[in-house]
Image: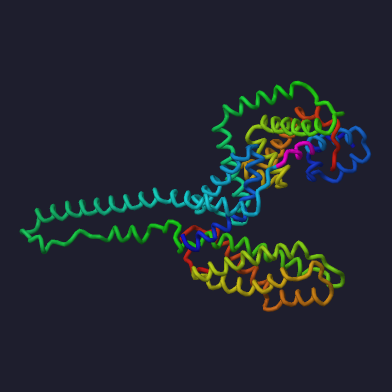
């Protein structure tokens, strides 16, 4: 085999090379030495630390972001208002003009009291068709995060469902993941109920006790305890429901913004 | 904003630290990275209706964070150029001595970090993006291509170019470090 070039060595470092590259490296001192240099350079790059941001960082970001979001919306609201006012004024002007022209052509004089009022329908139409600016009726963000949440929950449930009950299974990391999922699940469930997404609220309600049970389980599960947990997951087709509702949420979350709230 | 706001808050809380990490790798500056995090989520909020595929949400978020980082880097180009010149000068001054007492080794460590930062700053925007996403974030070539809007082969070439540049500048420094892979 020919010597490996630099690109193949870089691919090998990131695990993207084919198996032939590893075999060659094992038997070729020249390539191995070259590879070693690349590894050292890339290891050196790892030495630059990233400052730690604590668990409360997201909260800090949110509190700073909130008023910016509000401020960002304000000009949009003002613009919408200006457009609506301008549309009403223009409609009133054109209606008035047409009515006056028609009056001059065909009609004898009509008293002001009998004249039809300028239509207010365009303004109403504008109000109906203008999408809410981030109001409660927009479920997109909720669908987005719930879809993500259900994907994560599904992965966790699949892992535990497929664990071999014959041996002892270390679920310490699953337990931690489950703790986070429980906290998120609670908020999503409440938000879904409040915004009228009853199907999502319902699946989250079914999911919560199972996640809670996993989060309270010991770090190592064996035999009967694991089988019990697997039965809980299988009961009522929970995994299937999570998958179905999760993919529905995914689709709705990806759809254009005007998806009706109760479309799920 | 009601329920919408609650959900967006969770999104922010869940992804802030990841976005910060990417932003810091891109900008090399803590305060800039904080600004990028804010700007990223603000853009996400404004552009949420343009988001088409939820399955690639993380990729989309990364793309916005990278764009914010690149925008910020552009605004401080003059300052960076000045600092980069200083760093390059330091790099040109040759290899770093190795057999030093502990206190000096600490200095050496920060010196090496400075050299690495300077080397990273010589990468173009695309090279740095591709390298950060592959090396630090472990994203696949395809995902990086999606962020950069480039094909697989072009993405690979961008990563190769980045590694080549880093190697050219850092190889003199690595003679005493060990490879853990």
- The image shows residue B74, relative to residue A154, as above or below, that is above
Which picture quadrant has residue A1? top right
Dividing the image into 4 quarters, which one contains the C terminus of chain B? top right
Q: Which residues are magenta?
A: A43-49
Q: Judge from the rendering whether residue A42 lies leftward or rightward of residue A113; answer left or right.
A: right
A130 relative position to B161: left or right: left
Which residue is nearer to you in this view: B27 or A164? B27
> Which residue occupies 78% across, 22% down?
B94
- Picture coordinates of residue B140, whole percent (x, y): 71, 47
Report the side of B54 relative to A38 (left or right): left
Q: Is residue A91 above or below residue A178?
A: above
Residue A119 rendering spot, x and y as whole percentages:
23, 60
Q: Number of labelled discs?
A: 0
Instruction: Kindly identify the residue that appears in the image at 77 percent across and 77 percent down.
Output: A228
Along the line of sight, the residue nearer the viewer: A164 or B156 = A164
Q: Who is closer to the viewer here, A258 or B1?
A: B1
Q: From this viewpoint, which residue is outermost toward the left?
A: A108
Asked whether A44 falls inside the magenta stretch, the response is: yes
Whether residue B110 appears in magenta in the rendering, the answer is no
Q: Residue B7: image x %, image y %?
A: 54, 60
Residue at coordinates 68% horizontally, 46% vertically from top-left?
A52
Q: Position of residue A259 (x, y in %)?
A: 48, 63
């Amino acid at each position: 085999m020919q010597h490996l070039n630099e690109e193949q060595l870089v691919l090998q470092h990131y695990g993207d090379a084919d198996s032939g590259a590893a075999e060659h490296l094992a038997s070729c001192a020249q390539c191995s030495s070259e590879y070693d240099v690349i590894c050292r350079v890339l290891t050196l790059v790892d030495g630059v630390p990233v400052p730690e941001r604590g668990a409360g960082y997201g909260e800090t970001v949110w509190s700073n972001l909130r008023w910016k979001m509000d401020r960002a919306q304000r000009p949009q609201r003002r613009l919408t208002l200006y457009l609506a006012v301008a549309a009403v004024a223009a409609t009133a002007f054109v209606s008035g003009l047409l009515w006056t022209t028609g009056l001059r052509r065909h009609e004898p004089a009509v008293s002001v009291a009998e004249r039809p009022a300028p239509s207010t329908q365009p303004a109403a139409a504008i109000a109906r068709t203008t999408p809410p600016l981030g109001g409660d009726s927009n479920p997109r963000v909720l669908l987005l995060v719930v879809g993500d949440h259900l994907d994560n929950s599904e992965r966790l449930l699949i892992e535990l469902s497929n664990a071999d009950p014959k041996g002892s299974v270390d679920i310490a990391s699953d337990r931690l993941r489950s703790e986070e999922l429980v906290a998120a699940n609670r908020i999503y469930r409440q938000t879904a109920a409040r915004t009228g997404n009853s199907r999502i609220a319902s699946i989250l309600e079914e999911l919560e006790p199972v996640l809670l049970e996993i989060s309270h389980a010991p770090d190592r599960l064996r035999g009967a305890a694991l089988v019990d947990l697997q039965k809980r997951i299988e009961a009522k087709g929970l995994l299937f429901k999570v998958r179905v509702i999760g993919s529905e949420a995914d689709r709705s979350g990806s759809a254009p913004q005007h998806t009706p709230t109760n479309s799920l | 904003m009601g329920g919408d706001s609650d959900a967006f808050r969770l999104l922010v809380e869940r992804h802030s630290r990841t976005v910060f990490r990417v932003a810091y790798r891109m900008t090399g500056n803590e305060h800039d990275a904080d600004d990028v995090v804010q700007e990223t989520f603000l853009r996400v909020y404004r552009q949420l209706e343009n988001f088409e595929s939820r399955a690639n949400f993380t990729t989309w978020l990364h793309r916005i964070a990278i764009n914010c980082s690149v925008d910020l880097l552009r605004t401080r180009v003059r300052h960076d150029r000045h600092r980069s010149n200083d760093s390059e000068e330091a790099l040109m001054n040759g290899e770093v001595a190795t057999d030093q007492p502990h206190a000096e080794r600490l200095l050496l460590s920060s010196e090496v970090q400075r050299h690495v930062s300077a080397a990273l700053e010589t990468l173009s925007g695309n090279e740095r993006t591709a390298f950060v996403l592959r090396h630090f974030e472990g994203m696949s070539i395809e995902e990086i291509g999606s962020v950069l809007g480039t094909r697989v082969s072009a993405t690979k070439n961008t990563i190769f170019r980045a590694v080549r540049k880093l190697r050219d500048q850092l190889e003199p420094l690595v003679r005493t470090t060990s490879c853990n892979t």
